[in-house]
Image (cartoon, grey):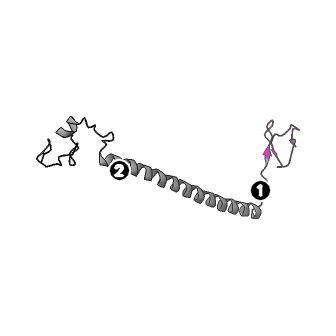
Amino acid sequence: MPTCRSGEKEIAKDANFCPNCGLRTEKGENDNGRTPVDRRPVWEKDLDTAIQNAGKLLEEAVEAAKKGLKQVSEEVKTEIDKVKETTPLKKTPVYCPKCGSKNPNDSEYCTKCGAKIHK
């Protein structure tokens, strides 16, 4: 029985490649056996799978976060509306841009100099 070139492990007579290390056997060279295209290490394939799974989990987490934020946003809006309904607005004075005097909040013109008040 033939042995692998990289060690002393026996391999089948009709094998083109060593099942342990992947090296081509003498028979494989004589038969012009080609090396498989995907010779990536197992850990690299596992890494690809892990990245794909992480991507899916991330998408699910983002959707859950959006849903949660939307719910919180609606609750906050409801509370703000309640506060607006129960809290009276203070009427703060308006100051004249020309003379600086204090005027009532609903004034369109200054009570002291008559200048137009821009709101």
Q: Residues within 10 Å of mark 1 (few under 14, many from 20)?
A: few
Q: What secondary structure is marked by label 2?
A: helix
Q: Is residue 5 left or right of residue 105?
A: left
**Horizontally, is 70 left or right of 36 in the view?**
right
Viewer-side residue, 26 vs 98: 26
Measured as percent of width and height from the top left, residue 50 is found at 39, 51
Residue at coordinates 44% horizontally, 53% vertically from top-left?
53
Question: Are the residues flagged by discs 1 and 2 in contact, CB closer than 8 Å?
Answer: no
Q: Quadrant of residue 118?
A: top right
Left or right of 2 on screen, residue 82? right
Instruction: Measure how far apart labels 1 and 2 are at the Cα level.
Output: 65 Å
Mark 1 or 2, closer to the camera: 2
Q: Which residue is mark 2?
A: 46
Amino acid type, callout 1: Lys
Task: Classify mark 1: helix, strand or loop.
Answer: loop
Instruction: Give the label on residue 118, or none.
Output: none
Rendered residue at 64%/58% (across/down): 73
The correct choice, above or below, for 50 with respect to 71 in the image is above
Question: On screen, 14 above or below 81?
Answer: above
Residue 47 on the magenta segment: no
Q: Residue at x 40, y 50 (%)?
A: 49
Decide whether residue 101 is among the magenta residues: yes
Residue designated by label 1: 90
Which range is magenta? 94-119
Number of marks present in the image shown: 2
Q: Earlier in the sequence, mark 1 or mark 2?
A: 2
Q: Amino acid at mark 2?
A: Asp
